[in-house]
Amino acid sequence: MKLALFTTASAVAAAMLIGAQPAAAQETDPPKPLTVTGSIALVSDYRFRGVSQSDKQIAVQGGFTVTHESGLYAGTWASNLAGWGTFGGANTELDLYGGYKVPIGGATLDVGLTWYMYPGGASNTDFAEPYVKLSGTVGPVSVLGGIAYAPPQRALGNFSRTPFSRGQAEDNIYVWGDASVGIPKTPITAKAHVGYSDGNPGLGPNGTSVAPTGRYVDWLLGVDAVVGPLVLGVAYVDTNISSAGSAYLLPNFSSTKDGSSIADSQVVFSVSASF
């Protein structure tokens, strides 16, 4: 859902932890009706769909998910914010999500909804985004495709005094694909991500936008390595947002404190652990 870095690393760590359990315990323990999984991560930059929400600074992130044996699940995830992603208050993003997973052939269909919250922040910042994801394997490669569509909401609308304004409600669509493959005889997993965003064409209701603005592509290439209970990650993240295009984020948070763009290329490091 969030950073491909964070999602992929958590999945790898969980798989390694499961694989490390004694075989006898796996064979004799009855399945539990409810399972709780979670993770915590430290990242050098919080990139949401290719755009930094932590002013290219370190972010602490974490969350947990409760899953029922029927396939229903619910959970929460949070990260600190800075710069463009700041809306006042606690300078925190808190996501609440829930959905249903069902196997279809050799794949898994996941349908759910995420509620993005910015506790104590400016008005008209929280918004809801339903999503559909389909995941499976192609030979040794794990693949996932998804689409998230946020219907028209005030948090995604245009600032009423801009020439682009068509009212205080806009929608947002994001389409993406992920792939990962383990490198044989190593603890390393290679990963890739590409996404396409189509959002509001101007400023948001607070003079900025809670979602990256306009039409653009983001991508990621990286590797994760399992080291004991930790997953160490490094990834190259970039977008095709031009300097002119980034001007739509003006006047508030179009660049970092050092003057560089928050949408240009960046190498992001991460360390995470799962339970």
Image (tube, rainbow, N blue to C red):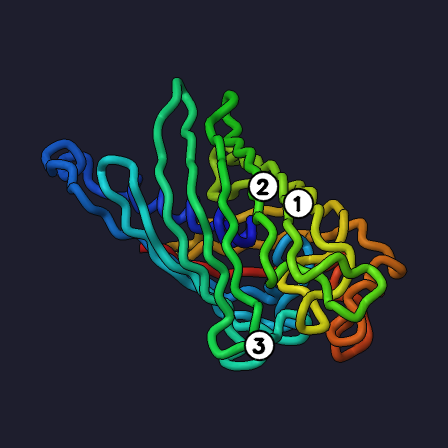
Q: Is residue 86 visible?
A: yes
Between label 2 and label 3, give the one nearer the viewer: 3
Q: How packed is label 3: few (under 14 Cα within 10 Å), some, or many (20 or more)?
A: some
CA distance for labels 3 and 1: 34 Å
State the residue lying farthest toward the front: 167
The numbered dot on residue 191 is 2
- Placement of 43 over or under 258, stated as above or below: above
Total labels drawn = 3
Res. 265 mark? none
Q: Mark 1 points at which residue?
A: 221
Q: Is residue 66 left or right of residue 255?
A: left
Name which residue type carries label 2.
Lys
* Residue at (48, 31) in percent of width and height: 134
Q: Rounded to the nearest whole Å, what is the CA distance between mark 2 and mark 1?
A: 6 Å
Residue at the far right: name it: 244
Q: Earlier in the sequence, mark 2 or mark 3?
A: 3
Residue 196 is left or right of residue 232, and the answer is right
Can you tell which mark lies on residue 122?
3
Counting residues from the start of the chain, the first of labels 3 and 1 encountered is 3
